[in-house]
């Protein structure tokens, strides 16, 4: 599932620079994907673009936004369940120039 | 006591919850468990009351509940902080939200906001330091 930010968010912005996929935007800020811009998903709170979220698969052992959020408001979206394969494919699509190593506990929360 | 924690507590006690959260968040980053979880409980408390001030009752309830769950392990005191009044007040606010959809500004009978008190255990109770 993509990670999403709940209404418990206090807009501190700690999560935004941690995302390896630049999937996190401040409220009201348009998001970008493959050269196109899109309307903000939230006008009030930081938000995560599902199309750009890989739950940090391919990058880290767990979601970095959740790791730095003291409010615990970056959580898996139960309405967007996704497999590791789907998330890994997305990571490769988002970073076509990067050579990804085989997934391991260090690069996928599914391997714990 | 660390100056940053002292400052964060002062902001909390004066009702500047966003500022309190901000200071404690910076402080929190450098710690490991169990201190990390304790500091996170204080952050949840600050964020909870911030949401209450802004009418976000759902966010308030969730944060105060997280604060209560985490802080329970540190009762009655930790780092020379007397935590029971804070814990009791948070539970009271949660109950009022559940029962009445309470907000402080809407109800003159709402409980006062808690203060995080420095203090230590003495015979028959607690002695407040500040």
Image (cartoon, rainbow, N blue to C red):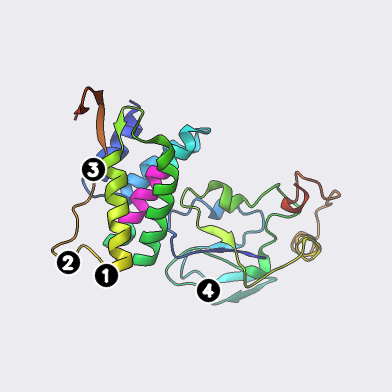
Circle 4 or circle 1, nearest the eye: 1
User: Which residue is at a point 44% across and 47% down the rendered structure image?
Assistant: B69
Query: Is mark 1 in CB contact (under 8 Å) with mark 2?
Result: yes
User: Which residue is at a point 54% across and 55% down the rendered structure image?
Assistant: A16
Q: CA distance from mark 2 to mark 3?
A: 20 Å
SS for tag 1?
Answer: helix
Ranked by sequence position, the earlier of labels 1 and 2 is 1
**Left or right: residue A30 compared with residue A93:** left
Label 4 in the same subunit as label 1: no
The numbered dot on residue A41 is 4
Ranked by sequence position, the earlier of labels 2 and 3 is 2
Quadrant location of the N terminus of chain B?
top left
Q: CA distance from mark 4 to mark 2?
A: 34 Å
User: In the picture shown, does residue A68 fall above or below A76?
Assistant: above
Circle 4 or circle 2, nearest the eye: 2
User: Which residue is at a point 44% across and 72% down the rendered structure image?
Assistant: A43
Ranked by sequence position, the earlier of labels 1 and 3 is 1
Q: Residues within 10 Å of mark 4 (few under 14, many from 20)?
A: some
Q: How far across and down, in percent of the image, does residue A24 sit? A: 57, 61
The numbered dot on residue B115 is 3
Span shown in magenta: B41-49
């Amino acid at each position: 599932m993509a990670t999403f930010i709940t209404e418990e968010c206090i807009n501190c912005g700690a999560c935004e620079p941690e995302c390896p996929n630049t999937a996190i935007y401040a409220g009201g800020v348009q998001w970008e994907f493959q050269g196109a811009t899109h309307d903000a998903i939230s006008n009030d709170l930081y938000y995560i673009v599902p199309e750009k979220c890989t739950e940090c698969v391919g990058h880290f052992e767990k979601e970095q936004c959740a790791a730095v959020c003291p409010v615990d408001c970056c959580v898996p979206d139960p309405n967007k369940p996704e497999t590791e394969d789907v998330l890994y494919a997305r990571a490769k699509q988002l970073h076509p120039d990067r050579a990804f190593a085989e997934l391991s506990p260090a690069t996928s929360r599914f391997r714990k | 006591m660390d100056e940053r924690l002292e400052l964060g507590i002062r902001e909390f006690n004066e009702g500047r919850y966003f500022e309190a959260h901000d200071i404690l968040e910076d402080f929190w980053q450098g710690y490991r468990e169990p201190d990390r979880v304790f500091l996170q409980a204080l952050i949840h408390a600050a964020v909870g009351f911030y949401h209450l001030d802004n009418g976000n009752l759902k966010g308030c309830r969730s944060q105060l509940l997280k604060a209560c769950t985490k802080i329970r392990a540190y009762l009655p005191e930790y780092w020379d902080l007397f935590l029971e009044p804070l814990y009791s007040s948070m539970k009271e606010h949660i109950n009022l939200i559940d029962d009445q959809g309470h907000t402080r500004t809407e109800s003159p009978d709402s409980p006062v906001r808690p203060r995080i008190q420095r203090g230590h255990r003495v015979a028959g109770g607690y002695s407040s330091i500040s």
